[in-house]
Image (spheres, coloured by chain):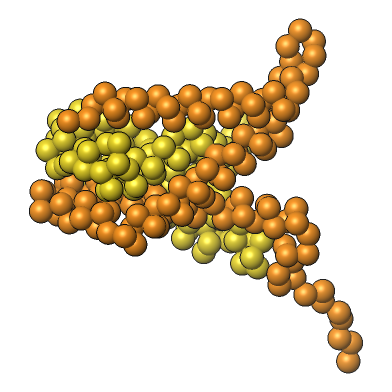
């Protein structure tokens, strides 16, 4: 009976640091999903009235929730950084004056845009604080 | 002369588009949103603890711009994550297929519908 050798693939990504980074990068999408769920529950509770929404707010104030959001925050930062790091490879080639725009330039522009957007969001929140 | 049937178009670009839009939005705003709603406001740091009180959030969700902001953030984050998780399942040994697709995109659709329905319910 022939018994072909099947190369085991479990834990394949641990073989190479490049793959480990890749897996972490992909895993950050779980944080994006988790945050979408946190927000959609909040919006649902908002529609259900004050008592329901206050319960959601109360849950956000608990220590487990704050620790969870600190983990989400770290994952969101990795998510954003990796997004702009791979952007030169995912977007169409850009040319300025006949020269191809360097990947590093695109990544730096992305980082700058992200920092500006984050600051702008904070300033808007600050302006609307009670 | 027989007319040829129209070519079958792939629906993949739609999901790629949602993935890209959600990726960009989450890269630009995700970290600060998590920081504000999950850490600063709950702890009362920099922003007061009643920043997200019921009347304020109700007014925000009733405002058309606020409504659109909440809807796009929630829906695009969900579609971005669903698309990415769907393709990552392959890497952890779960083959991509109708079941995995239904689970991932179905979850994103559910999040979208709940967000849309809730935001309609709060009125204007």
Residue A61 placed where, x, y %? Answer: 26, 54
Q: Residue at x 53, y 25 (%)?
A: A113
Q: Quadrant of the C terminus of chain B?
A: top left
Q: Residue at x 27, y 54 (%)?
A: A60
Residue B119 placed where, x, y %? Answer: 22, 40
Give left or right: position of A118 versus B119: right
Q: Which chain is orange?
A: A
- Chain B pictured colour: yellow
The relative height of residue A30 versus residue B36 in the rendered view (above or below) is below
Q: Quadrant of the N terminus of chain B?
A: top right
Q: Nearer the viewer, residue A54 or B81?
A: A54
The relative height of residue A35 versus residue A7 in the rendered view (above or below) is above
Say whether residue B43 is visible.
Answer: yes
Residue B113 placed where, x, y %? Answer: 31, 47
The quadrant in which residue A89 appears is top right
The relative height of residue B11 versus residue B88 in the rendered view (above or below) is above
Q: Residue at x 30, y 41 (%)?
A: B45
Q: Residue at x 35, y 55 (%)?
A: A66
The relative height of residue A92 versus residue B81 in the rendered view (above or below) is above
């Amino acid at each position: 009976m022939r018994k072909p050798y099947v190369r085991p693939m479990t834990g394949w990504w641990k073989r190479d640091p490049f793959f480990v980074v890749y897996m972490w990068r992909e895993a950050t999408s779980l944080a994006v999903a988790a945050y979408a769920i946190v927000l959609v529950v909040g919006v649902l509770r908002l529609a259900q009235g004050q008592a329901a929404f206050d319960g959601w707010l109360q849950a956000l104030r608990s220590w487990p929730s704050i620790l969870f959001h600190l983990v989400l925050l770290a994952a969101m930062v990795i998510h954003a950084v990796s997004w702009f790091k791979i952007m030169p490879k995912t977007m169409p080639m850009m040319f300025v004056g006949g020269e191809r725009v360097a990947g590093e330039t695109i990544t730096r522009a992305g980082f700058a845009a992200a920092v500006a957007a984050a600051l702008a969001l904070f300033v808007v929140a600050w302006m609307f604080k009670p | 002369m027989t007319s040829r049937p129209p070519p079958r178009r792939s629906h993949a670009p739609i999901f790629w588009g949602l993935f890209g839009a959600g990726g960009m939005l989450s890269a630009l705003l995700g970290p600060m949103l998590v920081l504000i709603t999950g850490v600063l406001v709950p702890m009362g740091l920099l922003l007061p603890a009643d920043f997200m009180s019921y009347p304020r959030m109700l007014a925000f969700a009733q405002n058309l711009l606020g409504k659109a902001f909440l809807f796009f953030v929630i829906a695009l984050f969900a579609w971005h994550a669903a698309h990415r998780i769907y393709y990552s399942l392959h890497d952890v040994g779960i083959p991509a297929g109708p079941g995995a697709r239904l689970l991932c995109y179905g979850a994103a659709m559910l999040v979208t519908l709940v967000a849309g329905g809730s935001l309609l319910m709060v009125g204007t």
